[in-house]
Image (cartoon, helix red, strand yellow):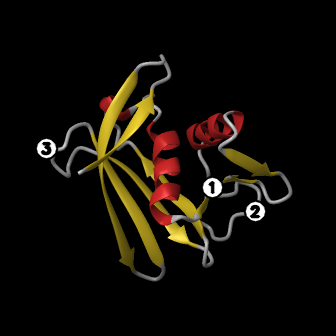
Amino acid sequence: MSFIECVAKNGVKSRFYYKYSITEHLFIEHNMMIFLSPDYSDADFFEITAKEVGSNTLKIIMMNNNNQSIYKAKGIPDAAILELKAITGKIIRSSSISYPSDLNERRSESATKAWERLEKHGQASYNAADDYFFTV
């Protein structure tokens, strides 16, 4: 199983393991299921899902810690977004609050904070005109 290195809010570094898959429903989805250790069950994970929106861009449509405290405030979204970029070679972008492409699109406050951390470290930029972040 592959892994990502994360830096928590308190500065502590942790390693998390992930499974990556691509599924095709109404659109092509890229999924990462992130676990505390390589032998955890699928019932206990952090999940990130992105859909293809063009030939070289993925849009994050869901990030969810499944209310598991072991996945909260660990810096997982930041590391997962960058890992998704590395795996796919594509630009990763956030959802837009101001200009959603459908009724289900939204960006939570915690997702916005993760993107702002990436922007602060020069790993993302913000498109103010269309209200979304994207990896650089």
**Residue 99 - label:** 2
Circle 2 SS class: loop
Amino acid type at circle 1 is Ser
Circle 1 SS class: loop
Q: Does residue 101 lie above or below 94 as drawn?
A: below
Q: Residue at x 62, y 67 (%)?
A: 103
Viewer-side label of 2, 3: 3
Question: Picture quarter containing residue 129?
Answer: bottom right
Write down the residue under mark 3: 39
10 Å crowding of disc 1: few (<14), some (14-19), many (20+): many
Q: Does residue 53 lie above or below 12 as drawn?
A: below
Question: Picture quarter containing residue 112?
Answer: top right
Q: Earlier in the sequence, mark 1 or mark 2?
A: 1
Circle 3 SS class: loop
C-alpha span from label 1 to label 2 = 12 Å
Task: Please say if the residues under marks 2 and 3 sit with CB atoms less than 8 Å apart.
Answer: no
Q: Does residue 5 lie above or below 1 as drawn?
A: above
Q: Position of residue 76 (x, y in %)?
A: 44, 38
Write down the residue under mark 1: 94
Amino acid type at circle 2 is Tyr
The reply, left or right, for residue 31 in relation to residue 93 is: left
**Residue 22 - label:** none
Q: Earlier in the sequence, mark 2 or mark 3?
A: 3
Viewer-side label of 1, 2: 1
Q: Does residue 112 lie above or below 95 as drawn?
A: above
